[in-house]
Amino acid sequence: MSLSRTGTHQALLLVGALALAGGLYALPKGIVKPKESKAELTQDAARTANRDGGGMATNGSKTEASSGPRPAETATVGPNEAGGTAAAPHTQANATQRRELNGLLAKYKATTDAATRRQVSLDLGSRYEAVQRFDSAGYYYAEVALAQPAEKAWQKAADAYFQAYSFASSEARKKMLGERARELYDNVLTANPNNLDAKTNLGMAYMSSDNPVKGITLLREVLEQDPKNEKVLYNLGVLAIQSNQYDKAAERFAQLVQVNPNNVEGQFYLGVTLARTNRAAGAKAAFLKAKSLSQDPALAASVEEELAKLQ
């Protein structure tokens, strides 16, 4: 079972694992250009989120700070795409997808019928997800939830913003998207306090806030309700690594692979943490298990590299 929602997200988790194994693991850090302060970037992002002129009207260096919808051209990246930007390396849209997005955006702006607008919003959310522009997807899904409030509608919007949060390339953007995700997950939990997936993501979204302790508390509450929750065990393990608590991290990943021995990420991280705590035999077994569970050549190469370090 993979813990990631998309193939790209899983690949990023693997990249994080490889960096961690080399001692370089860290939360994403953004580079603020000399003429673009963090305060300016955050203000621009907030304007776009509120749909009053930010993002789309800014200069090219700021487009990735926006949390609201963008035109299809700025959601495009690829070696053969003239409109692409290196600021959003995880987004891809071909010419056909851009035409579809532009057509739907025009329809969204033109329609005054509530039912049609909801359907177009759903279509836009789906299309933006397809090109991995998750913040824009979240915006339109939230429009649907506002029109017809319901647990699943709120979670669809919250999950999209959480995906955008997980890809955030700067601290300011991560904080902004995390705040929006938290607002939406609060709505989910108001509708259903027992939605553990929403509660787990809410906890993780608090990790970039001014109150990360609340995030840990929420994750532990989920674990009390569901001691075999793979997602929480995984997240608590990664958080333990980030705070250099490798023994605790190894314990979490050991619990995870006991629940699901076929969890690739769990086995790999277990190998990393056991190696860091001088338990070479256990680390070797975990690395080999991870390799046996995946056909990914990058993972296989990483496992071989880590095994060589254990010699």
Image (cartoon, rainbow, N blue to C red):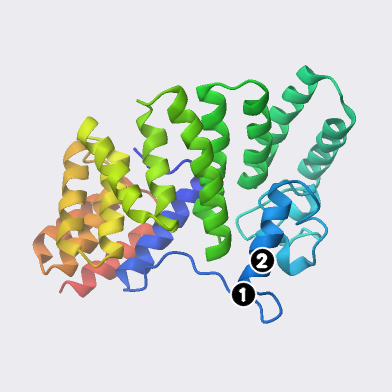
Horizontal placement of 274 versus 114: left or right?
left
**Dot 1 alpha-carbon crowd within 10 angstroms: few under 14, some 14 to 19, many 20 or more:** some
Q: How many marks?
A: 2
Q: Quadrant of residue 19?
A: bottom left
As drawn, 33 above or below 80: below
Instruction: Give the position of the N terminus as an image quadrant.
Output: top left
Residue 134 in picture, x, y percent from top left: 61, 45
Camera-side residue: 14 or 188?
A: 188
Residue 55 in picture, x, y percent from top left: 75, 57
Looking at the image, which residue is at 15% across and 52% down?
A: 251
> Which mark, residue 41?
2
Can the viewer see residue 226? Answer: no
Looking at the image, which residue is at 68% across and 31% down?
A: 143
Secondary structure, mark 1, is loop
Q: Amino acid at mark 2?
A: Leu
Looking at the image, which residue is at 56% across and 51% down?
A: 177
Does the CB distance between marks 2 and 1 fall below 8 Å? Answer: yes
Looking at the image, which residue is at 36% across and 65% down?
A: 18
Distance from label 2 to label 1 (Cα)?
Answer: 8 Å
Q: Earlier in the sequence, mark 2 or mark 1?
A: 1
Location of mark 1 (residue) = 32
**Dot 2 alpha-carbon crowd within 10 angstroms: few under 14, some 14 to 19, many 20 or more:** many
Can the viewer see residue 176? Answer: yes
Residue 254 in picture, x, y percent from top left: 16, 49
